[in-house]
Amino acid sequence: SDGTWQVDTSYISHRTGDPNNLSRNLEGVQETTYADPSEKKYSYEELKGGGNRPGDVDPKTKELNGGGNRPTDVDPKKKELYLTDEEFEVVFGMTPSDFTNLPKWKQQNLKKAKDVF
């Protein structure tokens, strides 16, 4: 030994040599399509509650929380966008443009307070 480090990299080509391996995790992923919030609108009553996904389990009661009430074509991360402008102002007390200008954490807190999270 001449005092220098010897690094064995022979295993690297074995692990990444197959280019088909790069996308194998994407095969099973289904792309969910949601309605365009600029075209499709729902009432506050249809959107509120139910967690993010239909059939979520309520951590307090350990029962299904009735998330099935939410229309299936609504993006659960953007429920507030499916409200009409008038109803949005009634629920959140501000215009949708004012809401989008708020910091993300304030938007999340408002959505939680209004049960549209």
Image (cartoon, grey):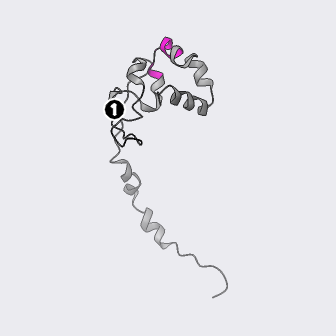
Most common SS among magenta residues: helix
Element at label 1: loop
Residue 47 appears at what percent x and percent y?
41, 24
Instruction: Choose between 14 and 34: the one closer to the eye.
Output: 34
Q: Is residue 29 magenta?
A: no
Q: Which residue is mark 1?
A: 66
Residue 62 appears at what percent x and percent y?
36, 43
Which picture quadrant has residue 21? bottom left
Q: Amino acid at mark 1?
A: Gly
The answer to whether 19 is drawn above or below residue 33 in the figure is below
Instruction: Choose between 113 and 18: the one closer to the eye.
Output: 113
- Left/right placement of residue 4 relative to residue 69 reads right
Which picture quadrant has residue 99? top right
Which picture quadrant has residue 33? top left
Furthest toward the front, the residue is 61
Q: Residues within 10 Å of mark 1 (few under 14, many from 20)?
A: some
- Left/right placement of residue 105 relative to residue 17 reads right
Task: Tell me what residue is drawn at x 60 percent, y 34 percent.
Answer: 105
Residue 115 appears at what percent x and percent y?
47, 28
- Left/right placement of residue 78 relative to residue 2 reads left
Instruction: Choose between 53 and 81: the one closer to the eye.
Output: 53
Tell me where the magenta segment starts and ends, as one range: 81-89
Residue 42 appears at what percent x and percent y?
39, 18
Task: Tell me what residue is drawn at x 66 percent, y 86 percent.
Answer: 2
Furthest toward the top, the residue is 86
